[in-house]
Image (cartoon, coloured by chain):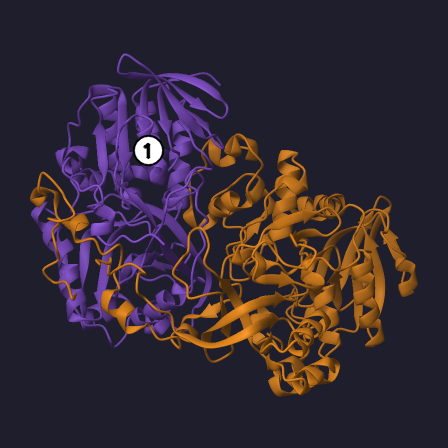
Chain colours: A orange, B purple
Amino acid sequence: MTIDPASVAGKTLDVAERTDVLVVGAGGAGIAAALDARRQGAAVVLVDENPVPAETMGDDIPMLWGGAASGAARNRTAMTEALLAARPGLATAVEAGVDVRLGTSCWGLYANGPSVGWLPGPIAGLADETRAWLLGVGRVVVAAGCRDMGVAFAGWDLPGVAGVQAAASLAALGAFAPRRAVLLGTSDAALAAADILIAAGVTIVAVVEVAAPLADAGRLGAPVLCGHRVVRAEGGIDGVTALVVASATGERRLACDAVLLGIGTVPVIELLDAAGCRIVFDPGRGHVPLLDAAGRTSLPFVSAVGGCAGDFPAQPDIAAYRMAWVEALVLDGADDVHVCRCEDVTARDILHLRPPRYLHAPPSRRNDASLRALLGEGPPNPDQVKRLTRAGMGVCQGRRCREQVACLLALGTGEPLASVPLATHRAPVRPLPLRLAQAVAEPPDMRRHWDTWFGMYAQYVPYWDVAPTYTAATRPRDPDDVG
Amino acid sequence: MTGASVIVVGGGASGLSSAWWLAREGADVLVIERGLVGWEASGRNGGGCSHHFSPLFAEEQRLWPQMDALLGYPTEFQPHRIRIALTERQMRLYGRAAANAARQGFASDVLDAAVVRAAVPLAGDATVGGYHYRFGGHANPHRTVQAYAWAMQDLGGRLMQHTQVLGFEHRAGRITAVHTARGRFGCDHVVLAAGPATARLARLLDVHVPMLPARAEMIVTEPLPLLPLGGVDGNGLYGRQTLRGNLAYGGGPHEWLADGDAPLPNAGTPLALHIAARLAELFPRAAHARVIRSWAGIVENTPDGRPVIERLSDPANVVLVTLSSIGFGLSPATGHAVQQLVMHGACTFADLSSLSLRRFAGLEPDWARLQGWEVR
């Protein structure tokens, strides 16, 4: 039988190893899932990307670290030991026969579906600091936890402006540097993270809330400033030194060495979304995977547990709360604060769909048109806005701006936030150096027949040489074909 | 929304360029798109503008340097390309473009390895040689497709997104209306430029267009300092350094797919790793660069990989357009040709006879199987 040699037909993949169950994320939910699968006799690999390399942390991946890690975070051995000490379940898992791998990230999940048929089965893409490789899996449990929503204000790029969950995770390893922090937001999740920080010796200087508090923030023992917005964070290369906030009655300057973003707890769904699991907007939690009663996603081989599955206290109306913060802070700095820090995109750039400055595009009528004039009909699509403004296309892979951009599009069009689609996640969901990919060999058959495009000789026959009729039997063949 | 003189079915690069050209010539035009503009293959390609084998090549080369000014929106077009060979076979293959272009009056330089390394600071010791094509170039597909849509709207053309075409109304050998999920739209002419859906829609007109969609994949790295010339590829990859500095490259095995009613998901595969490894071979001095995205595009191909651009004889007021996986770069010229076919019945600047469906008159019914285009 003829096969198209430049197609995937007959090509193999260099799948380095196999396991019955892969668990991604070694927090409480992940360890429990790994132990559960192991007790049922499965071969289980449990990966956790922590301790995260310093370069990755510098790009706020996977959490909004905000440059708040102490020097201890650079010592990988010390961090690994701290991680093992902070999570005794890891030792239990190792003793139970779970193959635990720290410092290992899962950057992609793949399976055959409507537009892919050549994979030998479900596959996970893994990487550590030295190589990438492929792991064949029976099923995958994603336990990737939560991160914090970014919110832009003047100075939000200063070291020390970090997510509250990120700060708490550093503090749990003794690697959070700041001592005096202002907390933005009053959700149960933000307060729970603040409790961890207080237990680690951090003083909460004040709690800021644009509207009325969601939970009893007074229990943290710090003044709760309701009806306040953030004017700016002050500081320099060594970090934030103060946060200036304002209410109807005037400005206040709060001395601090950290500003903790606790405005939104965001389930870490990037791996699930990139794999093609169906994602829905939960009014109390934001975007979460659609799960059946057994915790399975819309892809039968993938399930989700813990924070990334939405297992945290819901807020009454997350859309209204996020929009209130974005309206108060982000719109306030619309012209000069970068919402997308990787690509230097302001709120105004997003709302007016301005092309990036490096194009030096002349102003023209539609370049300053409204979102409505662009979109015409249908809800605003962040991917379309991303293509034009570059918001979310940077090295942090949209982690710092994704939710803010969605709020801006909702505010700019008057559409409900729930109707704004989530900006697409794409593998690799962790930045993957080209050189790590070189560890996966290109199979010989793929190498022999690799073509730049479709490998169709007839496509490139110059038009003056094309025969008047074409049949498969008489099609022109490449005289240089390697067969 | 009312009907239009010309209804263009498909808001990809070919359909939108056609609509823009028609609007420039004063036609009342309406584009109907099932999703968002440029959302399928037109927004998922390498942005190359160097189709030296096509009868539209000369017009492609004439138009691209003017497109920013003509459209009024940036396309990020950049002229020229350097193609780097890491094997003698690649060197031979890359010489074909130079030969085809030379016959049409476009120059190329043959480069030895040292010259390649001087011109492309990211290239390395494995370089065998290369070509500097002093023609062609590359543009940003996302920005260009949106620019077509906006420029068309500036001229009074209309665009209806999120609208599925369901059927056509015939009278006396002509199409008189297009039926959609959002109502009936009367028309004098139809341009059918629906990418992978073209064959299915053509069947409603009793026209057989042999084609099959396939998945092709690309990767994008974080931004790097700008190369002197961003249009550099080779080693079995197509792509470019974007004006922002990202390396955007694709290549390697494709997978043939069955067409359905809905767009297929743009799911990538671990092929991204092999593209990344080849890019590190091509640019060893960029091996540290991190891949931050990968994606797949669903691209249609005819049996010979060549476009169909033709005004049909029955129904007589339909222009059929499918570019068979090379549509983006040719789109300025395609739109011009389609505008002439709609308004004058013939193209004055290029001989489109090799792009007629007539070439498939004797095509075997099982051509896909005979060519090994296996669908799983």
Amino acid carrying label 1: it is Ala
Q: Quadrant of the C terminus of chain B?
A: bottom left
* Residue B309 position by quadrant: top left
> Is residue B124 toward the left or the right of residue A231 in the image?
left
* Residue A84 position by quadrant: bottom right
Camera sees residue A304: yes
Q: Residue at x 13, y 64 (%)?
A: B92
Q: How many marks?
A: 1
Under circle 1, the secondary element is loop
Q: Residue at x 45, y 58 (%)?
A: A112
Residue receiving disc 1: B193
Q: Residue at x 26, y 64 (%)?
A: A450
Q: Find residue A228 and report its horizontal and vertical position in percent.
A: 82, 49
Q: Nearer the viewer, residue A370 or A107?
A: A107
Q: Residue at x 51, y 65 (%)?
A: A108
Q: Find residue A211 and report its horizontal and vertical position in percent.
A: 83, 46
**How many other residues sit within 10 Å of disc 1, few (<14), some (14-19) or many (≥20)?**
many
